[in-house]
Image (cartoon, grey):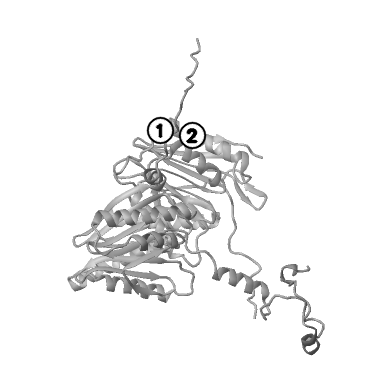
Amino acid sequence: MKLDFSGLESSAPLYGGNNGLLCDGFSDAPSFDLPVTSDFDGFQKNSIQMVKPAKGTTTLAFIFKEGVMVAADSRASMGGYISSQSVKKIIEINPYMLGTMAGGAADCQFWHRNLGIKCRLHELANKRRISVTGASKLLANILYSYRGMGLSVGTMIAGWDEKGPGLYYVDSEGGRLKGTKFSVGSGSPYAYGVLDSGYKYDMTIDEAAELARRAIYHATFRDGASGGVASVYHVGPTGWTKLSGDDVGELHYSYYPVEPAIVEQEMTEAIVA
Amino acid sequence: MPKEHANWSPYDNNGGTCVAIAGADYCVIAADTRMSTGYSILTRDYSKICKLADKSFMASSGFQADVKALQKVLSSRHLIYQHQHNKQMSCPAMAQLLSNTLYYKRFFPYYAFNVLGGLDSEGKGCVFTYDAVGSYERVGYSAQGSGATLITPFLDNQLKSPSPLLLPAKDAVTPLSEAEAVDLVKTCFSSATERDIYTGDSVEIIILNASGVRHESEQLRKD
């Protein structure tokens, strides 16, 4: 099979002098740099994997004056097929801690339930609630031990403990980051855009909820792998509460209402005798 | 050194489609009875539905050897539960047991696409839908298997109920009566049979309600 190099041909003429020193008959021909490897097809597959689009979802969480705001969409996709529009991506670990789901649904569901069990055992053994730092570390250590085995988890652990609001990002590569604002999933670039432009530490709960809702809505608008229902949760000193769950299709029309067309003459249906 | 690949696979796909619909006080679980391998039909008369408990039925498509193993594991776990607790397992409890059973084989999965249908402790219909490694969700209706992509859009059109994630919550119970739901299921299968080569022969339907269990069977195209 002949590769088409026509795109590489330049219109400028080649230097005659240099060619004499370097040429061996091949330097005239344009060429791609090809990797030096015995398994060319495997190499190609791996490089495609490296730039593969992120887990199909949009989740976000941020800390502000009144606590932590957590929001997510609810679409699950298998390749191009939407397998569900009503997936619970915000998982209630216990009454004061939430986890978000991105990546493999079964992996996230199972390990978050497992984390909830471990948190309860900690409470029973130590007679006090586990901190967000501790809970996120438990999960991160488990995921690190399964590193390389194909688990796919991109989660945020949000909660309120003795030190106040806490937010950690934990993933299946073994990463664990403390932070004040995160968004995970294929829709995260869009969510970050809205989040970064509207964020202020001194927001009220309602303002923060509306910011989170808008960020999810805009991500679902532009990202095909995100959609369904935008859920918004707030974590405060007394635990979490679900603030809203809105269908993003309906949110669109509430943000951008359609002007009814001005009709001058209307045709009515003829009455059939 | 390039990796060597095996010249056989432990899995096979025996095809078939499963559907379940939850109603206010009933549940309909249905599956076709065709078992295939590649382009051949192994049998026209194979049941994909298994009774796990008085009020829980599981229908599974995919690799029937794994399905059979999964059914055996769940039935024996239920028997142990009955010995220890002196009562039957509720459908939501069975749903979580199935999820955990599937996830314990996360690195060598059961190639089974399951739908669990039954009545919850309040007598309302419940349907749980699964992927191969155990993630699950309680839904109003579900289809799994080779004909799922043909049936699900039709059920979305006929039954689409408000998402359980909406707040303020909207009631998600299917308004259909039991007879209408059974008729809908028969329609689903005859349509799927037209366009999916792995679905056909006949459909086995189980109807679960307060008065007990009922079986129905309907012939489908055998080509």
Q: Is residue B13 visible?
A: yes
> Image check: A190 left or right of B164?
right
The amino acid at mark 2 is Leu
The amino acid at mark 1 is Leu
Q: Position of residue B109 (x, y in %)?
A: 50, 63
| Image position of B167 with respect to A191: above or below | above
Query: Which numbered circle lies on residue B125?
Result: none
Q: Is residue B54 visible?
A: no
Q: Position of residue A66 (x, y in %)?
A: 22, 61
| Residue wearing tag 2 | B184
How far is disc 2 from disc 1 in space, using C-alphas?
10 Å
Which quadrant is the N terminus of chain A positioned in?
A: bottom right
| Image position of B26 with respect to B135: above or below | above
Secondary structure, mark 1, is loop
| Residue wearing tag 1 | B176
> Image check: B66 left or right of A66?
right
The first of marks 2 and 1 along the sequence is 1
